[in-house]
Amino acid sequence: MVYEEPITDYDYKVENCTCAFCGCNCDDLVYLVKGGEVKGELKDGVVVSGYVDGGHVVGCRHACRLGASKVMEDMDQRLLVPMIRDEKGNLVETDWDTALDKAAQLIAHAVRPVFYGWSETSIETMHYGLELGELVGAVLDNQATICHGPSLQAVQNAGYPVMTLGETKNRADMVVYTGNNAMNSHPRHLARYSTFPRGYFRKRGRFDRTLVTMDPRYTDTAKMSDIWVGFEQNGDYEFYNAMRAVLRGKKLEKDIISGIPKEDIEDLVESMKQAQFGALFFGLGLTHTLSKQRNIDIAINLIQDLNKFTKWNLIPMRGHFNVNGFNIFMALEQGFPYGVDFARGYPRYMNGETNTIDLLTREEPDVFMVIAADPGAHFPSGANRHLANIPVIQIDIHWGPSTELADIVLPGSFIAVEAAGTSYRMDGVPIYMKKAVSKPKNTRDDEWIVNELLKRVQKIKGIKPEVASK
Amino acid sequence: MTYVDKPTVPNVVKFDEPTATKRNKLEVMLNTGSDIYQGACKKRGSTLKDEYRHASGTAYLDPKDMAKLGVKNWDTALVKTNWGEVVVYTAHSRDAPHEGQIFICKGPWANVIVSPETYCCCDPTYKGVPASIEKTDEDPLLMADLMAEVYKKYDKHETVTANKLGKKPDNNVCHYRS
């Protein structure tokens, strides 16, 4: 192992910052800031209120590898000026007015615009995005469409036996991770919420809990679990059905189900029944395989059946820090969680029709706006190949795979480090993420960019812009 | 220290495994997803760099499969599915054994070959895609080159390359190979 010296070369500390990486939204981070001037109150080297103007985050305490890597970003690839693609296909730097006007023209004259992303920005930005989408008849969609979309459908099908992560910490004595590798995707989830922390009723932390992982792969989470259930690839649906059958007192006729001997299934169900408070966390292993939302249906039904014996709850392991926020925000404002289509002037939601991937594979959109997302890195090529035919507007902080496909690039700011905003944790708890340092000079807040686009589109459409709240 | 300097997996492939017979091409099941190296590299924003190519453009194989193919850590392989083909590095999987399955972290390389079929459930099939893998001498492309070669948004000239797309998706009609 390589030992790295602790960072001592810093001027200020900003405490209680929120991590903007995964759905855990750990709100106990300490940023170590070098340089700059404190705009606010400073007490013993700790910035008590306000932020550091012109400073850089050189270190990050308490964060996992993922959170730290995001906070201490790669400034080489930071987008710092607006850019527009010229005829030769090169991105050329330009000023904000030109770039915003061109983007507004594209959006205002589009027939079927799609605004995709939103999961790595604040609720305040979504507010203007929704207004813009409603005005131009766009489809508003977020990353749930490629990750936990089936989970949301299953919630609509079967219900949502939900809890908060605090309940897990204080009460859970059996924790099940299924179809996800929390040690890699949510590294502090076990440490901060589910398995290791000492809770009110679980005084001994890890020793008071049983950790079960159900995954075809022997993942890093499985390696540290008490029980690993390695069912077959695409065998999730059958396996959960078998568990439900055992739970309802049926005898299993097959000896081996999805690669698991029936005696093992019976033992597992028995121990799940014996738990005092069970928590099930499910990830993309369930939503990305062939039975999609039916996997989650059956997992939710399993939890409902278990509740006849003891207390069990579940939480989807949401990936981005605000992917849940968009779903909650849209469900509150429009009644549908994601993939909301305003083409007819009123909100519509139809799975397989108004979702980004389906729209792109059918080659329907004529303008695509990416905000705080990376379709270049995360969409299948069958969907991405349509992005090569249409203008793409990108609002992001780093030069990523999507920038290679983008025609207009608008540099945004980094929520929870350079801009404040509200986000929702994976269990639906809203957290206000504060600003720690100032943003690079020529970049703008996402909120400002989307609001500015809205005002310019309103002007093109001949609608009197309302005075913005901020 | 970057992720490239430090090999994430030990170089333990034995070429004289008694059960392994040498093959030129293997039929495998492709899974994609994230791991901590890919996540950290992507979210830090280092996507144009070599470390992203190593973190994301790597197929993690079971050691037995590696022995059959005759590849070792950081050799290169061509992965083909119905949806496209792409050159990636090979490495010994940390989650082995999982013979007959390969894992490629999500990213531009995996995107070329995963299925865009949503079956009207909004979510593409990222996991469990039938694929074939064979050894190759070509190097995986860096992110920007790959995006330019595969999607050809700004350069429409036809170039002969191993990184290309397969057939077009056909409006959610089931193509699943039985």
Image: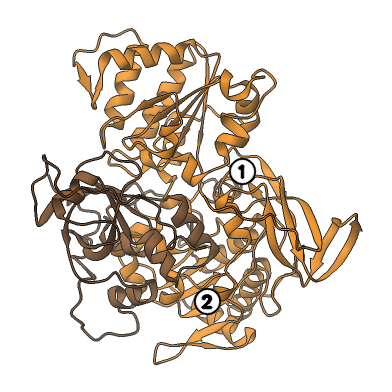
Q: Are marks 2 and 1 in contact (CB under 8 Å)?
A: no
Q: Residues within 10 Å of mark 1 (few under 14, many from 20)?
A: many
Q: CA distance from mark 2 to mark 1?
A: 34 Å
Q: Is residue A278 left or right of residue A125?
A: left
Question: Residue at position x 33%, y 12% from top?
Answer: A266
Q: Is residue A266 left or right of residue A447?
A: left
Identify which amino acid the numbered label 1 is placed on. Arg
Confirm whether residue B14 shows in the render.
Answer: yes
Q: Give the colour in which the image draws chain B.
A: brown
Question: Residue at position x 34%, y 64% from top?
Answer: A360
Q: Is residue A277 left or right of residue B173?
A: right
Identify which amino acid the numbered label 2 is placed on. Ala
Q: How many marks?
A: 2
Q: Position of residue B75 (x, y in %)?
A: 25, 62
Q: Chain of mark 2?
A: A
Q: Nearer the viewer, residue B175 or A337?
A: B175
Q: Which residue is mark 2?
A: A108
Q: Chain of mark 1?
A: A
Q: Position of residue A125 (x, y in %)?
A: 64, 61
Confirm whether residue A339 shows in the render.
Answer: no
For the C terminus of chain B, which image quadrant? top left
Q: Which residue is mark 1?
A: A425
Mark with earlier residue (2, 1): 2
Q: Residues within 10 Å of mark 2 (few under 14, many from 20)?
A: many
Q: Position of residue B39 (x, y in %)?
A: 48, 55
Q: Secondary structure at mark 1?
A: loop
Q: Quadrant of residue A35?
A: bottom right
Q: Give the colour in which the image draws chain A.
A: orange
- Work out whether A182 lies above or below B154: above
Q: Nearer the viewer, mark 2 or mark 1?
A: 1
Question: Residue at position x 61%, y 33% from top?
Answer: A193
